[in-house]
Amino acid sequence: MRTLGFGVRPSTTKRCTVCGRFRAYDADDRYCIICGHDALEAECSCGRDFSYALTESGPIHCPRCGKAFHGKSPEFEP
């Protein structure tokens, strides 16, 4: 019997520094799926990954350093 090997690629939570959205991406993804900018970051400036942010709504703050992550960059024009 032959089985199909569908591998699940591990995802990384990344934040677009332009539009401010958190999404699950492949580790090697560089472009935001919402605004298309090459501006994804995988962790806060303190080194904390963004895995906590996907299930949250409203203003988000880093649980390690308190940095706020809400709002859009002034250069974002939808």
Image (cartoon, rainbow, N blue to C red):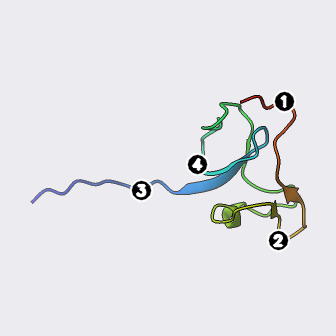
Instruction: Say if mark 1 contacts mark 2, CB within 8 Å.
Output: no
Q: CA distance from mark 1 to mark 2?
A: 27 Å
* Residue bearing the label numbered 1: 75
Left or right of 33 on screen, residue 43: right
* Residue bearing the label numbered 4: 25
Instruction: Say if mark 2 contacts mark 3, CB within 8 Å.
Output: no
Give the structural element (helix, strand or loop) at label 1: loop
- The amino acid marked with disc number 3 is Val
- The amino acid marked with disc number 4 is Tyr
Q: Position of residue 34 (x, y in %)?
A: 63, 37
Give the structural element (helix, strand or loop) at label 2: loop
* Residue bearing the label numbered 3: 8
Q: What is the quadrant of residue 16 in the picture?
A: top right
Residue closest to the far left:
1
Left or right of 44 on screen, residue 21: left
Q: Nearer the viewer, mark 1 or mark 2?
A: 1
Q: Nearer the viewer, mark 3 or mark 1?
A: 1
